[in-house]
Amino acid sequence: MIFWEIAKRNIRINVLRSSLAMLGIVIGVVAIASMGILGNSLVASVSDSLSSVGDSVIVTPYSGGGGRGFGSASSSANLKITEQNFQQIKRVAAPNVAIPIYQTAEHMKIGVGSDDIVAVIYGLPSDDVPDLLNLKEGVYNNGNSGCLIGPTFAKDHNLIVGSRISIGTNGDKGTLRVTGIIEERGMSFDISTDSALVVTKEWFENTYNRDADYDEVVVKVKDGDTASMKIAIEKQLNKRKDMKIVNVMDSKATLATIYSTFGMVTTFVTAIGGISMVVAGVSIFNVMMMSVTERIKEIGIMRSIGTQKKEVMSMFIYEAAIIGVIGSTIGGVMSIMAGYAISALILNTTKHLFTIANALSVAEGMGFGIVICLACGFYPAWRAANLNPIEALRHE
């Protein structure tokens, strides 16, 4: 098509100006798409870390503030969940599993001559551990002489199944043999085991003279209706409005809030990237207006020999489309590279890079770039098509 070829010729003649316009589109696409990739990857990473606790209701002693951190115990050592409270929770939760949990921080030695370290120890009923934790290797601990350890703890201290750990400042709490290593859980709402030890409920009670005064209770909800379970537990234990006994957290609702927050942040940073695309659009508009001004006499000649308005208009639209498509394509490729680098540096993983959501982010960035180019090229094209042929021929 002759007008397509004329459009390509004009871009070749003004290659520097056209390249600078394309550069603006490239920057805009990279800004939009890479921010979208980062947001999607961040949400996917958090989802992986928290997916194992999305079916839990976490009950902790009421501390007055109504809140708690991820995997943390109560803010006061005197605040505990009594055996009576636990039995009430267990009855309300049935047939779901309610798991009572002890927690403390303890000094320990790993190997002969090693320095004391401090790590968190969780005490759980042996029968309930498989409902809460998955093993990476080894076997679950059923005896009072063994323990499970988190993957980060094992890596940091070069521990394997069969290693021994002395508990207490001088090993006065005894020695435990590692029977298994827990799968990585990342962030969690219930217990953070990646850098911790898990022992039996009986060992914990005997060692620390604890007798049914738990730090928290985790209810694993099989049908996924965590909201109803939360309401039922609160209704049972917090009967009196003037005296709350426990805080109850619905992990699924908390996850929804986290995802919503990440979504808003992603939208915000993508919108910031969109500003650069608007700036690029202004550059395209300027380039196209200059092209029209420089070619007024040429347009007059074309119109005088019978070229129709729509054909003149299409010639300039083609120019804008070529700049938009090339710039957006280059920007799309570079945004994948930028997304890879950002994911590797910020998230320390690129496993969430090649997903449908990220592909859509790149497609949206490229599509927006092309639309901006066409929109900013429309008025100059319309102006060129509507020039008076006689006045155009007289233009110098």
Image (cartoon, rainbow, N blue to C red):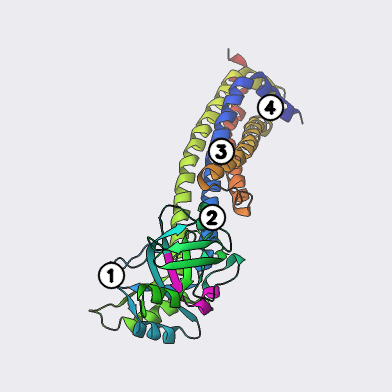
Question: Does residue 203 show up?
Answer: yes
* Sequence-wise first label, 3 or 4: 4
Residue 49: x and y, percent? 52, 59
* Sequence-wise first label, 4 or 2: 4
Write down the residue under mark 1: 63
Q: Nearer the viewer, mark 3 or mark 2?
A: 2
* Sequence-wise first label, 3 or 2: 3
| Residue nearest the viewer, comparing 335 with 388 | 335
Q: Residues in magenta?
A: 121-131
Up-down: is 305 above or below 274? above
- Residue 7: mark in rendering: 4
Query: For this view, does 71 lie left or right of residue 277?
Result: left
| Residue nearest the viewer, comparing 390 with 100 | 100
* Sequence-wise first label, 1 or 2: 2
Q: Cα distance, mark 4 to mark 1?
A: 72 Å
Write down the residue under mark 3: 30
> Which amino acid type corresponds to the residue marked 1 in the rendered image?
Ser
Identify the residue at the far right of this view: 1
